[in-house]
């Protein structure tokens, strides 16, 4: 569990890192399961409902950058969403009643793992209140060199920035130059050893650079919400919605709090994962930084 000061740090900064949450056996099983799933991308030529592929992917040399909604596609990851030590930390940050919102596994392979542009998760799935967060389960050691997630401290207290492209469609990426007062130089890498977990607030500004190291960076991400936070986009399948409870009970009275909201509409021109949606933005911050560094 987190200490009182850890919880206060999360409230103030919008993120916290909890070391060594996973036991060794569970970490090994997750890694093995991920490797088996990735091997299933062999022979595939394009993205599908399970795999999001790197631009350099080939059927005979598979390169997977994301496994989509693993909790829905693979029962093991739904079971893992109720991993006891993780749920205890979630209770400290979200309260006793907790619902799983979504999941994904992002992979940055050595030397080419794709960057993720600056964004706020809140832009993708606003709720009736913002007691919503994402858990990053580190399946590899993570540091700045291999593309650790970067978070701007206390940005969860600020505006919800535009995540729309030049045509007005949602694209899932911010344009930092158009965000007055947002200081990306303060961004902190969420580093840790494999088996640690990161927790970041749904409104926190974050992103990650390409993996320039010779080491992989694999991150299992779960999104959780207080059970009285209802998605503003609606609930399509109420039985499935209820089945995603991981702790406590589910109320049918949403808790409403004032929070800055921009709806993710009109929908992206390039649908799929965040990688596909973000291709619509003409100015890609991490790529421009890389080009600038190369030119220097």
Image (cartoon, rainbow, N blue to C red):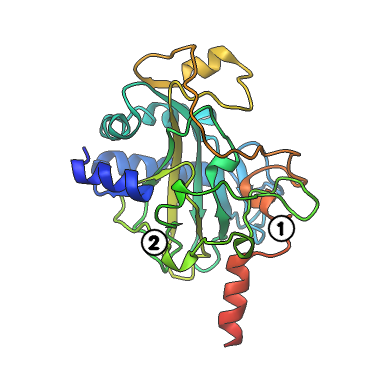
Mark 1 touches mark 2? (CB < 8 Å): no
Q: Secondary structure at mark 2?
A: strand
Residue 142, percent from left and from top: 37, 59
Mark 1 lies on residue:
281
Q: Is residue 238 among the parts visible in the rendering?
A: yes
Residue drawn at (50%, 52%), measured in percent from left and top?
205
Extreme residue toward the bottom, this view: 296
- From this view, report whether residue 65 is shown above or below residue 210: above
State the image quarter where residue 63 is shown.
bottom right
Mark 2 lies on residue:
188
272 vs 43, nearest the viewer:
272
Residue 296, percent from left and from top: 57, 88
- From this view, report whether residue 96 is shown above or below residue 219: above
Q: Residues within 10 Å of mark 1 (few under 14, many from 20)?
A: many
208 vs 31, nearest the viewer:
208
Residue drawn at (43%, 62%), measured in percent from left and top?
187
Q: Secondary structure at mark 1?
A: loop
């Amino acid at each position: 569990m987190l200490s009182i000061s850890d919880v206060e740090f999360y409230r103030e900064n919008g993120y916290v890192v909890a070391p060594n949450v996973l036991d060794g056996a569970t970490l090994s099983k997750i890694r093995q399961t991920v490797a088996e799933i990735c091997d299933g991308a062999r022979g595939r030529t394009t993205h599908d409902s399970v795999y999001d592929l790197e631009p350099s992917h080939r059927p005979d040399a598979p390169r997977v950058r994301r496994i989509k909604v693993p909790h829905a596609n693979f029962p093991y990851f739904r079971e893992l969403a109720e991993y006891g030590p993780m749920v205890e930390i979630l209770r400290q940050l979200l309260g006793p009643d907790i619902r799983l919102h979504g999941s994904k596994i992002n992979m940055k392979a050595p030397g080419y793992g794709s960057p993720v542009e600056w964004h706020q998760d809140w832009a993708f799935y606003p709720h009736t209140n913002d007691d919503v967060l994402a858990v990053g389960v580190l399946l590899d050691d993570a540091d700045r060199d291999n593309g650790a997630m970067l978070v701007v401290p206390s940005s969860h207290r600020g505006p919800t920035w535009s995540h729309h492209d030049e045509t007005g469609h949602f694209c899932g990426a911010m344009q930092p130059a158009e965000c007055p007062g947002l200081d990306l130089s303060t961004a902190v890498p969420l580093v840790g050893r494999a088996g640690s977990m990161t927790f970041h607030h749904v409104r926190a500004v974050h992103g990650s650079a390409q993996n320039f190291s010779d080491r992989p960076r694999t991150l299992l991400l779960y999104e959780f919400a207080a059970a009285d936070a209802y998605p503003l986009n609606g609930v399509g399948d109420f039985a499935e919605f209820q089945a995603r409870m991981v702790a406590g009970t589910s109320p049918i009275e949403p808790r409403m709090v004032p929070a800055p909201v921009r709806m993710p509409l009109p929908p992206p021109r390039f649908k799929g994962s965040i990688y596909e949606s973000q291709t619509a933005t003409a100015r890609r911050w991490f790529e421009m930084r890389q080009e600038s560094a190369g030119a220097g």
